[in-house]
Amino acid sequence: MHSVSNSIKRRLSRIPSESFGIGSLHLKPYDILLKDLEVQSSLGRENGLKACRAMWRQTSTVIWEIDKTGQDITPLLDIKHSNILKVFGSVISDKPTHPMLLLEYAPGGNLFNYIHRREEAIPKQQFFNFVYDAFQAVQYLHRCNIVHKHIRSKNFLVFPQGLKVCNYSMLKSERNSINVENESWRWSSPEMLRNPLEVTTQSDTYSLLIVVWEMLTDKLPFEEEDERSKWKIINEDLRPSIPNDLKGSIVKIFKNGWQKDPIKRPNIDVTEQSLCLYALENGFSYHRFNQSFDMLTCKCREELQDSMSVLNVVVISSNVVAIHMIVSNSTYKVQIFTINKGLLKVVDSISNGDSSKISVFRICAKKQKILAIGGKLDLDDIIMTTINTDGEHEDERILKSHFPWYKCQSVACDNQGKIYILVLQSHHTWQCWKYDETKPCCLIFTHRGLSVAPKILIQNNMIWCTLASNVGIYDLVGNRLHNLQISFLDLAISKGGFIATSIPYSNKLQLLNYTGKEIKAFTILKRDDEDTHLAFLTDTSIIIANDHSIEMVQLNSID
């Protein structure tokens, strides 16, 4: 082992470079000395760059050459996401060396080999898990204003917990952006092949769908074509063939995402939403479950004051929660709590005992503030007001609509701040109306069912209309996507793919996946005469509000 390590170290040290001020050893905070690494074995070449495995601080790592001289790697260190390969720092020596980085080691190798060296296709649930991981990584890069430019299956690495992307565009120079030798043209968009300077986030979405196709079909893109075919991709709309056994929405997803004009392609968020719905259509959970939850631990608890009945619990931000309650037959109250160091603290209470004031009838979160809708006893018009987390009313406006305020049963906002109101139209018929400040109210969908406490929730660009045992799932323009038949008193939905329900006539909390399949049921504290209201603070933290208390519980694994 020592002779192999010394041989690799000597070989690494013989390549001249001018980067990182290595000769004079002007160390930066992220510099790691080569002599501090236990170099173990060569991993050959990845994407034309040499790599070798090494141990560093009892961690398996990879020393990877980069071909950008004198690069500041601080942006790489700033990128922190569970689905993006970790960069520990730059590797330097007391001798001139080629620029190198120390990266996380992927025990499962790259996705390309994982797909094409298997004897059987990737199981469907694992396929959806991998798709989720890949989209989470690239969406994060796009939010950081980074276009990856080199999305292909070899740049996704397989870990026990899922996929991670290597932010390869930061490691390669522009002169190698399209390398025919490594056949990256198979995953490249028409504009990337035509001119690498034209790439946008839509180019990444195109390439990402090639990887999705590759995982789904178990085939190499354009496996019967050679490098000359890239001109067919540019000029003749050559695309991977879609097998006849692929039906339904996935065909539309590929065709829309592979359009020649990048402007006409759906953005990555819309594409991911479509893939989530494709998973639901096929009875699979799109979002990932990395652990099984065995325990529910109470982290903090606070008694509610003056509550006669809790109507709703709303998460405003990562540490602010609002409870909407009735304190008498004609008085509503909104109580705002902060969660800090395991304590629930009341910030303010907004009450409207005076009948001349607005009756705060329904609330939801809107861009880390509280949106309240209601009205006055002598008017039918809906009054809409925004309340900050200090309890201060910031604005108030009258919403002209086709229905009186007292028929509004629930309100929700999407990520853009658009407002959706669920209205009782008749005894068994409910309508969802969309309010845009620049346009009149418009009807989004009609949902039928019997319920005494209907609610709409918006999560992952989907509207969830919850009526007793019937949950209708719609997109933001009103297309019905899916329907769940589950029994509950109240329901909460997490971004990561969990549904939490309080079970009727029981002190049980049920955890489900997006298909309605039970993961676990937990016992919670409640009185027999109380309803239980739920909201996810994070994927593993739930706010539970009864008529007399509010508590935050944590989902934990015994392991």
Image (cartoon, rainbow, N blue to C red):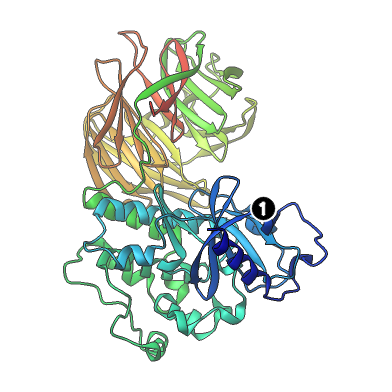
Q: Secondary structure at mark 1?
A: helix
Where residue 144 appears, as percent x and y from the top left, is 60, 57
Q: Is residue 323 above or below residue 394?
A: above
The residue furthest left is 245
- Quadrant the C terminus occupies: top left
Q: Amino acid at mark 1?
A: Asp
Relative horizontal placement of residue 63, taking residue 460 as reference (left or right)? right
Q: Is residue 141 visible?
A: yes
Q: Which of the pair 338/193 is nearer the observer?
A: 193
Q: Which of the pair 308/189 is nearer the observer?
A: 189
Where residue 499 appears, as percent x and y from the top left, is 33, 35
Q: Is residue 167 visible?
A: no
Determine which quarter of the picture holds residue 459.
Answer: top left
Where residue 58 appears, as percent x and y from the top left, is 56, 45
The residue furthest front is 3
**Residue on which the image places disc 1:** 36
Residue visible at 57% across and 21% down in the picture: 337
Relative horizontal placement of residue 231, taking residue 82 as reference (left or right)? left
Residue visible at 27% across and 50% down in the picture: 125
